[in-house]
Amino acid sequence: MIIDVHGHYTTAPKALEAWRNRQIAGIADPAQKPKASELRIGDDELRESIEANQLRLMRERGIDLTIFSPRASFMAHHIGDFQVSSAWAAVCNELCYRVSRLFPDHFVPAAMLPQSPGADPASCIPELTRCVREYGSVAINLNPDPSGGHWNSPPLSDRQWYPIYEKMVEYDIPAMIHVSTSCNPCFHTTGAHYLNADTTAFMQCLTSDLFREFPALRFVIPHGGGAVPYHWGRFRGLAQELKKPLLAEHLLGNVFFDTCVYHQAGIDLLTRVIPVDNILFASEMIGAVRGIDPETGYHFDDTRRYIDATAIEPDARRKIFEANARRVYPRLDAALARKER
Amino acid sequence: MIIDVHGHYTTAPKALEAWRNRQIAGIADPAQKPKASELRIGDDELRESIEANQLRLMRERGIDLTIFSPRASFMAHHIGDFQVSSAWAAVCNELCYRVSRLFPDHFVPAAMLPQSPGADPASCIPELTRCVREYGSVAINLNPDPSGGHWNSPPLSDRQWYPIYEKMVEYDIPAMIHVSTSCNPCFHTTGAHYLNADTTAFMQCLTSDLFREFPALRFVIPHGGGAVPYHWGRFRGLAQELKKPLLAEHLLGNVFFDTCVYHQAGIDLLTRVIPVDNILFASEMIGAVRGIDPETGYHFDDTRRYIDATAIEPDARRKIFEANARRVYPRLDAALARKER
């Protein structure tokens, strides 16, 4: 089986965006604020939006299952306050849940959180709990910078995040560390902010002793870990300067990298420097880079091809495609086991 | 000849730091503000600080010449106002110039600028001019985020930077795009902020048409280009989404990457994906990562070993070690030619 741990609902029906636009207008003019019940999207529409897009490509590429969360760039936690984020997260999470019910063999939900700049992360726990208990979410997406590029929240090692971590440990779910749209003109969202956040989050883990506090906590760093694997020597050296243990001991029981790296040379580096147990297959398909690579004739985000072509043993490939995901996402493994998959 | 395009004076005599501390104290209490003339460092002290450190390692590693600029993390443009930055830049640039006079065969200066958050970049031009004309500086270091991690300056494509670019073109000097210390607790200086800035700067170039405005402008992106080469496919794909020309045409006449990547796999990736004409040898030695790699028994920052070991033709190696630097830094080439080197 091939599990893609990083899919977002980037193809949701237009009604979702229209509802969001009314919600944003409602911040200034409460008369425009829509109720959740005013968002009406039928099952057929959901089915169509998935069948023609993600599911079509999954079939073409031989991907069996996607961990599916709301569109990352649309989380936009910087817009409005906690109430705005809360209503928006509820609506988005419900849609991903419905997709998982319509295509139970192909999609399993992960939750976005109703984070908001300056709001206590603990305020996200009711939504987190609801998604795990009622929707069967197997993971959360955690935004280390809800400001959208101003980076004025404390680092991930700060105690403010601990209530989230305690729930993650209780439910045995990992977090993908994933920012949203940049509203800082210095940072292009998918070309700079996403990759910077990946590198930043890894370094926040490296300089702290977070995983001594939470030995069971698991973070997935998306986009191949940002700059981290390419600079693995630098990070090993920095850990040494900072008198931290070797990275294998210090972080690699808790930190995992996905394979959203859109060319062969990048995946080859990833599999060369990062232990195979820490690599999870993912494509973030129909995401930042949707085009066809003129150098290969295939989609940039068809990452399965790169994994297939990289020089690793069949057993390592099986780990990247399936076994690691089942280990890092135990609720996914349990759900699959219940279906004898 | 082997030219290291990225060296900082990280080993300056302690008197420099003491002077800076008094200068910083003088921001709150003008009585403590030191005059430039109160910084007294003799030639012997300078000689010793270089001979025992950079020059010793250059000899051990077979590096002939280093482009030498003030310590990057000490630029700290966020401290004080333009007057503070101006006095500090003058002092630091003079020391690098003196090193270049004491060791004319081994060091050539590059200038830091007296940038300050919110100050017009044009205010840096007198120091830039002085360094080029009086000190023989062959390049500048340009900080895209003088705030030190708050990223509240406009992107490098903004017209506010144009006066600097006009001078660069007039003098035919490149800029290394290099941030300084992060005062944002989210970003570790050398583990996150530096790499993020590299990626950010590259993406600012990609999304803009800066090099159509300034066809002769040249930027060196340090630390192997941050996350860029590892994600080269992503950047090629983003350029395509944004309807930009191919990266080779759009950026590679103007953007160059150094080799400050501290492990073999990283350098192998760099030389595999980036055209050889765009790679400049550098080590940033006695910098962020000073230790010995337990996996190799050699210093992490001994980047010559990685270039020697990577699978490229001898002619490509000569370009990386020397010819590219002479092309990108024409004033360096002219200075060497005058000495028949």
Image: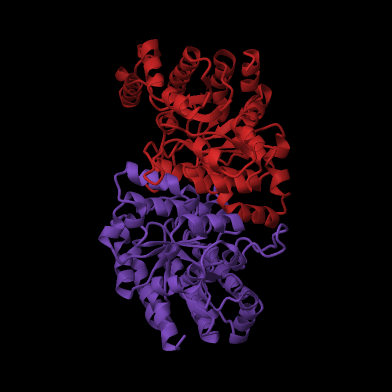
Chain colours: A purple, B red
Of residue B40 and residue B116, the one placed in the foreground of this image is: B40
Question: x and y percent of residue A151 in the render?
Answer: 43, 50
Instruction: Find residue B315 and report its image quarter.
Output: top right
In the image, taking residue A312 as reference, residue B18 lies left or right, namely: left
**Residue A9 shows in the view:** yes
Q: Residue B216's x, y, as percent?
A: 70, 31
Q: Position of residue A60 (x, y in %)?
A: 65, 76
Rendering coords of residue B273 (x, y %): 62, 48
Q: Furthest-bottom residue in view?
A: A339
Q: Residue at x 67, y 27 (%)?
A: B169
Q: Total of numbered circles in the picture? A: 0
Residue at the (53%, 54%) spot, across then down: A269
Does B141 sit left or right of A171 as displayed?
A: right
| B281, above or below A290, in the image | above
A234 up-or-down from B49: above or below: below
Between B71 and B106, the residue placed more toward the observer is B106
Depth order, front residue of A91/A173: A173
Q: Residue at x 59, y 25 (%)?
A: B1
Question: Is residue B82 in sight in this rendering?
Answer: no
